[in-house]
Amino acid sequence: MAASDSIVIIPTYNEKENIENIIRAVFGLEKVFHILVIEDGSPDGTAAIVKELQKEFPQRLFMIERTGKLGLGTAYITGFKWAIEHKYDYVFEMDADFSHNPNDLPRLYSACADEGYDLAIGSRYVSGVNVVNWPMGRVLMSYYASKYVRFITGVNIHDTTAGFKCYRRRVLETINLDEIRFKGYAFQIEMKYTTYKCGFKIKEVPVIFINRELGTSKMSGGIFSEAMFGVMRLRWDGWFKKYPKPID
């Protein structure tokens, strides 16, 4: 069994077309990563595929099965707690559909492990607009949503809704994960905002985001709505809430 200091958390719901390929791509990297799949009761057989792969990759591939589609935020919180319990030093968020390129994982890792940042964000907008195969309307909505979040919160992050990230474990140990309230896009914003308010060092690493080719997008108007209104609540909380400081 190849030991690793890094765990990649991949939430899944109906990802049978992608899950084996994304797992093999991560395990094919020179740096050793482990993977934790948070599987939300996919009716398409995603869990069965992961279970077969666990026979091939024992002690590198893990899965938590949940009873229904409980939301992206709760999936990651579940994964974060598992990663803390198992003492991984670097904890990654990544989609199953190849919109996040596994080859960028070592770059995010290096930003934290070698350069000393506490959170590395795979950013679509830090060096222009690096999005491939998205409809223009969705590109504009995502880009200006990040602009809106920066304006309201004052956080100097270009891609505030990005879901491709690497945390040092101490960030997740410092944040009260049970107080994170949002489930969709606003979850990503809330985690970045909380990380910033706690005083951690954040770096945006430029990546190219490629829209999924297989499977169905989980995006909805309700997710964007949660983000838009949730940001105002975050800013309000930021004026009065006392945020914990980094744990050494």
Image: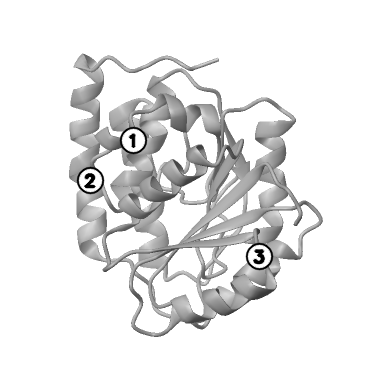
The image position of residue 170, as x and y in percent, is: 52, 27
Q: Earlier in the sequence, mark 2 or mark 3?
A: 3
Indicate which disc residue 58 carries: 3
Q: Residue at x 32, y 45 (%)?
A: 187
The residue type indicated by label 1 comes to Leu
Give the vertical position of 190 relative to 36 (above or below).
Answer: above
Q: In terms of image quadrants, where is residue 22?
A: bottom right
The image position of residue 58, as x and y in percent, is: 66, 65
> Mark 1 = which residue?
177
Q: Residue at x 68, y 74 (%)?
A: 56
The residue type indicated by label 3 comes to Pro
Q: Earlier in the sequence, mark 3 or mark 1?
A: 3
Mark 2–mark 3 contact, CB under 8 Å? no
Q: Residue at x 36, y 25 (%)?
A: 154
Q: Is residue 150 left or right of residue 157?
A: left
Q: Residue at x 78, y 51 (%)?
A: 31
The residue type indicated by label 2 comes to Met
**Other-residue count near label 2 (Cα within 10 Å), few / some / many at <14 / 14–19 / ≥20:** some
Q: Is residue 3 left or right of residue 141?
A: right
The image position of residue 111, as x and y in percent, is: 68, 35
Q: Earlier in the sequence, mark 1 or mark 2?
A: 1
> Mark 2 = which residue?
228
